[in-house]
Amino acid sequence: MLPELGLTSWDGKAGFRVTIQSIDAQRALVGIYYLSCGICVLGTSQPQMLPHGDCIIQAAAHVARYGDQPGDKHMMSLVFVMSRIEKVRLSLSSKGSIHEWPRIQREFDELSAMPGLPPWVQTTLLYRYNAFRVR
Amino acid sequence: MSRLCPFVIIADTTTAEALLQHHPFILSAILVITTAYEVPEQNAFDAVFRRMLAKTVIVEGKRSLDYLQGLLIYLSWHQTSFRHENAQVFQLLHMAIGKTGLSIH
């Protein structure tokens, strides 16, 4: 797909790269990833539409470094948490997932112990942890 | 608002007039999500939002960050305007991802 807004561009073997340095555009890119995870993985258990990738990490890192808004410094943690949740969700839907439980539990514990997580992310984690445990 | 949706920053000093002039799509999305308790008004704003989206993005093929940010706001609060007869969360999300230029697997 051709870049319509020019937020990203295809760079051969290097994959997608963020091309625009505007903070607003990169915030929007992270926001789309967050929504995609939120709606597909957390909300409806559908396949993830926008998988985690270098492009998302680049955008989050840029916003965290140069952004001046209160939420900007949490962008990397947010992307990290959502990617882990995405990973856990994928492992649950694969064969033999019951054996994955100790590793999943460990990942959730690691995530909860991350410093500087906003309270709403911690609540989301706790909620998903309990939901996965019930399954 | 930026506390709850840190992906679209609108300065506290921004007026509705300025939004209408420079970011009409963002204003339209805000009007839809903030009229959750006035159903007839919300339906009317929702129809305007969707018509605007279809006309500018699909028919005219315009490209602007305003549309992406408007979609982000609309989708972040989609539960406030959810109707079974016009539920298009996944289509709109696809559209938003398409606008970033990333491939969809």
Image (tube, coloured by chain):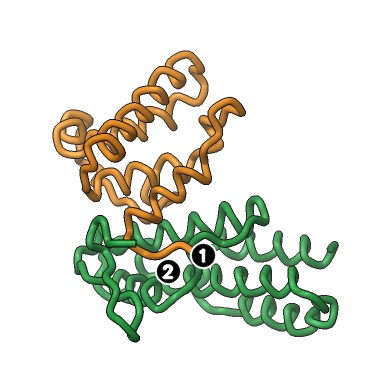
Chain colours: A green, B orange
For marks 2 and 1, the one nearer the N-term is 2
Question: How dense is the environment of label 1, judged by Cα within 10 Å: few (below 14), some, or many (20 and up)?
Answer: few
Q: Nearer the viewer, residue A103 or A108?
A: A103
Q: CA distance from mark 2 to mark 1?
A: 7 Å
Residue B59, given in percent of the width and then of the height, sits at 27, 34
Give the SS element for disc 2.
Answer: helix
Q: Are marks 2 and 1 in contact (CB under 8 Å)?
A: yes
Which residue is under mark 1? A118
Crowdedness of circle 2 by 10 Å Cα count: few (<14), some, many (20+)?
some
Measuring 68% from the left and 76% from the top, which residue is drawn there? A108
- Same chain under badges 2 and 1? The reply is yes
Q: Which residue is mark 2?
A: A74
Chain identity of mark 2: A
Q: Nearer the viewer, residue B73 or A67?
A: B73
Q: What's under tag 1, amino acid-wise?
A: Pro
Q: Nearer the viewer, residue A30 or B98?
A: B98
Foreground of the two, A107 or B45: B45
Q: Residue at x 59, y 55 (%)?
A: A40
Circle number at residue B71: none
B37 displayed left or right of A91: left
Q: Residue A76's quadrant in the figure?
A: bottom left
Residue A67 vs A107, above or below: the answer is above
Task: Determine whether A64 is above or below A12 in the image.
Answer: above
Label 1: chain?
A: A
> Does dot 1 land on a helix, a strand or a loop?
loop
Spot occupied by residue A116 in the image (x, y as percentages of width and height): 49, 74
Residue A101: give x, y in percent of width and height: 80, 79
Question: Tag 2: residue type?
Answer: His
**In the picture shown, does residue B29 fall above or below A14?**
above
